[in-house]
Image (cartoon, grey):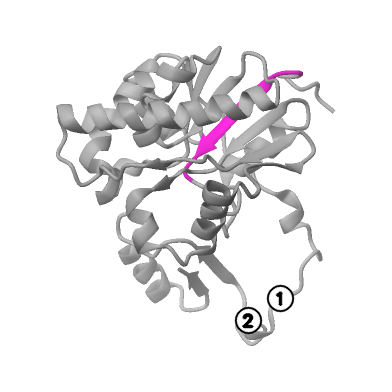
Amino acid sequence: MNHPLITGKDFIVFGLQPWDFEMGSNCKNIALELAKHNRVLYVNRPIERSSLYKFRKDPKIQNRLNSLKKGVDVLKMEEDNIWVFNPRVVLESINWLPPGRIYHSISRSNARKFSSQIKWATERLQMSDPILFVDNDFLKGLYLNDYLKSRLYVYYIRDFLLSQQYFIKHGTEMEPELIRKADIVVTNSSYLAEYASKYNSRSFDIGQGCELEAYIKGGHRLPEDMKSISKPIVGYCGALLETRLDLTLLEIIAQKRKDWNIVLVG
């Protein structure tokens, strides 16, 4: 077995997916790998004011509210060397604002409040000079290290979010600026590494990992509702959106390869 490159360090890991996200998460998997030889503080996304009204019944929001109001599971050890933190703060919802001075002013205020919560958690864990690892969240990550002042700021890009309408409004300005500020940028594809290198020469493609045990032959039985489908089966699980997938190409393949069975799960 190869010797780990990083050992005995403290990490703050924050990204788009919280620890209790229903689906798999690159960020969570990376945190688990780091925790094999380091200590990790995994920071869940803080509540935004709009979410209090729109998604109040969501179990994740209820969990955050219990932490916020009652102090339940604010800082909890979930795995060996991994502590999950629910920040006790409500941030302002500002994506609706136009780009400009007011947006950046409130964004900085949000970052200051958020970072003070993270500092509280690192002090409780007696973390010394932690490394900040931000997974793809340039909206909350741009000013975060201005206040945390971590020894190393690592920005991880696993998805080109600027292809999505929600992120493009402020992202075309904020992500390049964050990439410039980061000490190092890591990506899961050569395409994203090339994109990041336009703004930071310390940008590297580290590849895309996977959970191999999920693909071990004989490890899983075919679901009952798929046993009647003839093989070969081409499967896809993800968003069925033109911005993320070439649906026309799939239609062409289905027409030309009628012996294939294409199963799409949105």
Residue 40 marker: none
Horizontally, residue 189 falls left or right of residue 250, namely: right
Callout 2 secondary element: helix
Query: The residue under label 2 is which amino acid type?
Result: Met
Task: Count neighbours of disc 1 (C-alpha within 10 A) and say few if under 14, some if 14 to 19, many if 20 or more.
Answer: few
Q: Residue at x 54, y 67 (%)?
A: 235
Tag 2 near tag 1, CB within 8 Å: yes
Which residue is more in the foreground, 97 or 180? 97
Whether 22 is drawn above or below 117: the answer is: below
- Verify whether residue 189 appears in magenta: no
Image quadrant containing the C terminus? bottom left
Whether 46 is drawn above or below 183: the answer is: below
Callout 1 secondary element: loop
- How far apart are the two marked residues, 2 and 1, measured between alpha carbons? 7 Å
Q: Using the rendered image of the protein, determine whether residue 213 is visible from the camera's viewpoint.
A: yes
| Residue range corresponding to the magenta coloring | 8-16
Image quadrant containing the N terminus? top right
Which residue is more in the foreground, 32 or 68? 68
Which residue is more in the foreground, 228 or 25? 25
Residue 222 marker: 1
Residue 62's spot in the image, x, y percent?
A: 52, 60
Residue 113's spot in the image, x, y percent?
A: 42, 30
Which residue is more in the foreground, 131 or 2? 131
Horizontally, residue 199 falls left or right of residue 224, namely: left
Task: Count neighbours of disc 2 (C-alpha within 10 A) and say few if under 14, some if 14 to 19, many if 20 or more.
Answer: few
Residue 226 marker: 2
Residue 229's spot in the image, x, y percent?
A: 60, 83
